[in-house]
Amino acid sequence: CQVSSVGCQVSSGRGRAGGLRLPRGAGLRYNRDMSGSNPFSGKRILVVDDEPRMIKFVQVNLELDGFEVIAAGNGLQALDRVRTKLPDLVVMDVMMPEMDGFEALKQLRQVSDVPVIMLTVKDEEDDKHQAFSAGADDYLTKPFSPRELSDRIKAVLRRVSSGSVIPDAEVLTVDERLQIDFATHEVIVEGERLSLRPTEWRLLYHLVQNANWVMTSEALLQKVWGVEYKEDVQLLRLYIAYLRSKIEEDTRKPRYIVTEWSVGYRFVMPSD
């Protein structure tokens, strides 16, 4: 790992984050908000990686930003830490012994909605798709800078804590086929209730709140994920596909979430 005052270059001699070499005192000098008004101060972050020096590097930098950091060395330990330590967010490496990050995430999602950022040396579309499909909230590729990781953590925590205002009608009837339950964050498709993941729900909520109006991709990304993601169009496309797979009768000819080419998306509400 080559660390400068602005970031960390993680090299891999084993196809993953191995051979980590941290110069003493390096990587810790960049501007921090020391005003005492940090809304994330004290938030507990679980860092999961089988490289102790990688954990230490991330821990020191996050603690300088006011986070409390706990650690786990593999997926099995991560599941135990989530149950016993109740972290606010998990940063988890993909390639680990005992249980890799993808499998740990799948098992974690069976018992917890704690937000998860996957951390890996890979930058392949299939890996990103696998991470989001398993329930990840974000995906960060090594090499990364301490500031980038901290900003991603804050963005995810903001999304999780923002919540949504429930409208007067807790259950919105779109048409004879689709209803949206704002109280339970579920959709009712042909009488069957389907749960949505938190990010899927936020995306649907903003589309429905602006029904029959075109929402630009940039606006959706900023509202659902945060300003840091305003150019990540592929991330938006993935979640649009997830939503369509749950509510559309034919995803190739969507009835509710319509693509406005080169602009964004529109949720179609039938006229009275």
Image: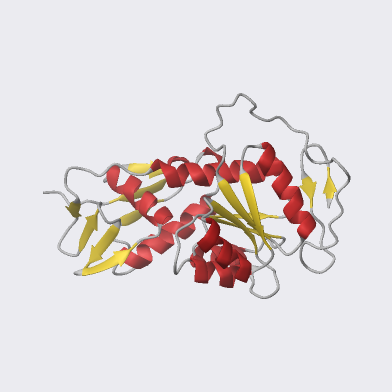
**Residue positioned 36% across, 54% down in the render:** 201
Residue 238 x %, y %: 48, 59
* Front residue of this view, candidates 33 and 152: 33
Tell me the quarter of the picture where residue 14 sits: bottom right
Q: Residue 97: name its quadrant.
A: bottom right
Q: Where residue 168 appears, x then y in whole percent?
A: 17, 43
Between 84 and 34, the residue placed more toward the observer is: 84
Q: Residue at x 46, y 45 (%)?
A: 159
- The answer to whether residue 154 is seen in the rendering is yes
Q: Position of residue 174 (x, y in %)?
A: 19, 55
Figure check: 25 above or below 89: above
Viewer-nearest residue: 11 or 87:
87
Report whether 187 appears left or right of 252: left
Q: Is residue 130 visible?
A: no
The residue most toward the top is 35
Seen as rendered, the residue at the extreme left is 272
Residue 145 lies left or right of residue 82; in this view the side is right
Q: How is the image coloured?
A: secondary structure
x and y percentages locating residue 189 in the rendered image: 24, 66
**Residue at point 66%, 57% (across, down):** 71
The residue furthest front is 84
In this rendering, the count of numbered labels is 0
185 shown above or below 134: above
> At 69% from the left edge and 68% from the top edge, which residue is drawn?
95
- 46 vs 191, left or right, is right
